[in-house]
Image (cartoon, grey):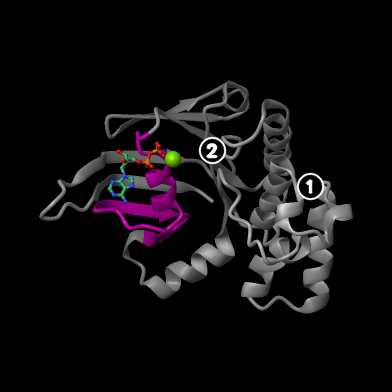
């Protein structure tokens, strides 16, 4: 899925007590379908804001955002919800697993949301648990897992519905270097299967080493499109 931002600005709204925060200022950017892009920048530079805009969680204050041919910035909320469920996988720094669901049920969640038939759901979740190396932990709950294992569950949940776009917000930010590496290798392997566009906010130089685009944000602006070799 090709991603295109056309002159996008984003402000957190001000009110009587607080001034508006201008986070993105007239940003244009294209990421080719199937590419792996890393998003880098100081804390507070707007990486999460940009991912939330691309992921149709927030709408731009100005400008247009396209996921493939669809201009998301003008779609009604119901269509955005559908788009998020079918076309995007999210991976977060703090995993965001549902604590009352097992590993299997957490991974199955996106399929259950769109009413996937039971047999297909079982088969897909089993395949994904195998890929992330957690078949033996399928009946465990998140609080019985290490951070690295929790993030592998979250990766399973992000890929189980085969979305054309994966957005990862500092997925190794809460992991030690060994587990961070395992998680990055897993994301790289998913990308190597082909067909998935991945945008990952990260501080990891290791991660940056296998991205095709390095997007840097500073002072509301972006330096991007650098095709890496
Ligand atoms: N809900 C909010 N209200 C006001 N300002 C916010 C809000 N969320 C984030 N910000 C501000 O927007 C800027 C960008 O934040 P963020 O996108 O989270 O940056 P990053 O992910 O790069 O650390 C920061 O200055 C942050 O303080
Ligand atoms: Mg952030």
The crowd level at tag 2 (other Cα within 10 Å; few <14, some 14-19, many 20+) is: many
Does the magenta portion include 64?
A: yes
**Label 1 lies in ligand 2 vicinity (Cβ under 8 Å):** no
Q: Is residue 86 left or right of residue 102?
A: left
Left or right? Give the position of 203 relative to 7: right
For mark 2, give the secondary structure.
Answer: loop
SS for dot 1 = loop
Crowdedness near tag 1: few (<14), some (14–19) or many (≥20) residues, C-alpha within 10 Å = some
x and y percent of residue 136 in the render?
Answer: 89, 53
Name which residue lies at 59% across and 43% down.
Answer: 34
Q: Position of residue 29 (x, y in %)?
A: 37, 39
Q: Is mark 2 within 8 Å of ligand 2?
A: yes
The span shown in magenta is 44-72
In the image, residue 55 above or below residue 209: below
Mark 1 or mark 2: whose residue is earlier in sequence: 1
Identity of the residue drawn at 51% across and 70% down: 82
Q: Which of 189/226 is in front?
A: 189
Residue at horizontal 67%, vertical 34%? 184
Residue 132: give its label.
1
The residue identified by callout 2 is 170
The Cα–Cα distance between marks 1 and 2, rounded to whole angstroms, is 18 Å
Q: Indicate the position of residue 229 as horizontal and vertical percent values.
A: 58, 21
Of 121 and 141, which appears nearest the observer? 141
Q: Position of residue 72 (x, y in %)?
A: 39, 61
């Amino acid at each position: 899925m090709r991603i295109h931002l056309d002159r996008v600005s984003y402000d957190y709204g001000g009110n009587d007590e607080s001034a508006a925060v201008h986070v993105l200022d007239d940003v244009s950017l294209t990421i080719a379908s199937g590419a792996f892009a890393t998003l880098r920048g100081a804390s507070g530079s707007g990486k999460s804001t940009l991912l939330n805009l691309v992921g149709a969680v927030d709408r731009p204050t100005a400008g247009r955002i396209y996921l493939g041919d669809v201009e998301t910035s003008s779609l009604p909320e119901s269509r955005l919800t559908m788009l998020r469920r079918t076309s995007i996988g999210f991976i977060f720094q703090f995993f965001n697993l549902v604590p009352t669901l097992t590993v299997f049920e957490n991974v199955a969640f996106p399929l259950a949301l769109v009413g996937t038939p039971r047999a297909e759901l079982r088969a897909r979740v089993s395949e994904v648990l195998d890929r992330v190396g957690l078949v033996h932990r399928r009946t465990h709950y998140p609080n019985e897992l290490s951070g690295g294992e929790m993030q592998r569950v979250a990766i399973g949940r992000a890929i189980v519905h085969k979305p054309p776009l994966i957005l990862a917000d500092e997925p190794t930010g809460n992991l030690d270097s060994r587990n961070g590496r395992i998680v990055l290798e897993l994301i790289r392997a998913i990308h190597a299967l082909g067909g998935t566009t991945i945008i990952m906010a990260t501080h990891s130089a290791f991660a940056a080493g296998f991205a095709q685009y390095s997007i840097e944000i500073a002072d509301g602006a972006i330096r991007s499109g650098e095709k890496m070799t």
